[in-house]
Amino acid sequence: MKRTHSCGALRLEDVGKTVSLAGWVDRRRDLGGVIFVDLRDKYGKTQVVFNPDRNPEVHKIADQLRNEFVIYITGEVQARPEGMGNDKLATGTIDVKVDKLEILNASDTPPLAINDPKEESKENDDLRLRYRYLDLRRPWIQKNLILKSQFLKAVNDFFYANGFENIETPVLCKSTPEGARDYLVPSRVNAGKFYALPQSPQQYKQLLMIAGMDRYFQIAKCFRDEDLRADRQPEFTQIDVEMSFVDQDDVMDLFDRFVTDVMGKVWAFTPPSKIRRMKYAEAMLKYGSDKPDLRFDLEIHDVSDIAAESNFGVFKNVVAASGKIRGLAAKGCVDFTRKQIDDLTTHVGRYGAKGLVWMRVKANDEVETQVGKFFTTEQLNALRDAVGAKEGDMMFFIAGPEKTAATAMGQLRLEIARLKGLMNPKVREFVWITEFPMFEYSETEGRYMSMHHPFTSPMPEHLEMMLSGNLKDCNAQAYDMVLNGVEIGGGSIRIHNPKVQEKVFGLLGLTEAQ
């Protein structure tokens, strides 16, 4: 048996050819005794026709066909009659009149809808995993696998073209401190000893840089024993990269090109030639997140100075305690119901907010609020102007410690965007977040901790500040790439000076032995 073509290959220029196809019966229709079958393989679909006038024996066999039968056919390519084409199929201008048919395998009625016209997987995960071999046969699932394959090829091509070496690192290794628990593998030849599966190839790639390999990349499998989340799973694949003798601009410039040359081409969109860069402090102030979704506005504003002048005790007390008041204008949300507001209050409460103050902007830009007696008209108007609210908008305010106010307001921003349908899935907004704090104070530990890890280098202009012991204002050479509110990559410039590294360890309270 030999296929001459795939089920997605035939076109009008093939009319008159004798061809052989193999695949799965996607759909079967019997119209006045003539049987039409959409034959499917990985490459597409072709309509094949069994006409009793052409070959009654083959037609009789075809009468047995049902969805997911595996068949092999030989026949003649013919143009479809005028007006009978199918624009939704690449092969929709032709069909194949069948002369030979072989049923390679019959099929029971599948427990999964393999040819769902809406390309939806409606079954629960347990059923899908039980019949994974059928789930993977679905065209839309296959498209995802093919897309990943094309993406990984483009990744390899890009890094080879930019002077990188693809080097595999060990999978069975020694356990080292990382951000999660290790998966352990017992050693047969060393009783009581265990290997760890790598959480990342971090130490191996640093060894490669010390060895002078200069530019390394790897499509690396990583393993982390941690609870499942939407963006976390025990086993995942990452594009792992390391470079020598570069600064952070070199790294970000390289990945600007990566987005254009790899992601843009594989997903067929036009990204910016240079991705926007935003400092961590700006991201937290304006968007309440270090991975902001920039597909919509809803910018957050600090109104602490205005709020502190009011007689509203909640605001005054928070500002007096060095806290912050953050606010935003929810465009066109003046008609939010009390239930919607209560739901939003509950939502921000999950992120530490003690409450949610709301104000409506009515006709003639007049501000209406239940706490209006604590504000002068001038103060209400100043709040309205500070957050950019207009007639028809709703204003929201959160008071608390700076990090709590920022994070809770950021989550409110996302929830309002979800309610108003502002997260357009067809829009792609990239941004680099830079200059993360090098240290953050831990209330539970009672000391400063590394925000990322203790090997991140400070900004050159902040080195002396750090060496003098000012940790609060010291920023790091760390950077994350964010797409539509999701961190898709990141890294940092490592400390290469042993004395600076020793100083960082000391500032973090580590002893020489540690």
Image: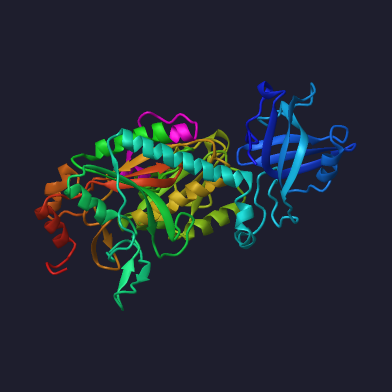
Query: How far from the left and from the top, in percent, is residue 499?
Result: 9, 54
Question: On screen, 356 above or below 217?
Answer: below
* Quadrant housing the N terminus: top right
In the rendered structure, the answer to whether residue 78 lies left or right of residue 506 reads: right
Q: Please state which of residues 66 and 326 is positioned toward the viewer in this rendering.
A: 66
Residue at figure coordinates x 49%, y 47% from the top left:
414
From the viewer's perspective, is 367 left or right of 315? right
Q: Which residues are magenta?
A: 263-285
Please identify the residue farthest to the right as the structure is shown: 32
Is 108 colored magenta in this rendering? no
- Residue 299 lies in quadrant: top left
Image color mode: rainbow
- Residue under the point 12% across and 58% down: 502
Name the quarter where the C terminus is drawn. bottom left
Q: Position of residue 169 (x, y in %)?
A: 30, 54
Decide if residue 427 is on the left or right side of residue 316. right
Q: Is residue 89 visible?
A: yes
Q: Is residue 278 magenta?
A: yes
Q: What residue appears at the point 15 percent right and 49 percent down from the top-left corner? A: 496
Q: Is residue 473 visible?
A: no
Residue lying at the far front in this picture: please name it.
1
Q: Give residue 492's position: percent from left, percent from top.
A: 26, 47
Front residue (pair 373, 203): 203
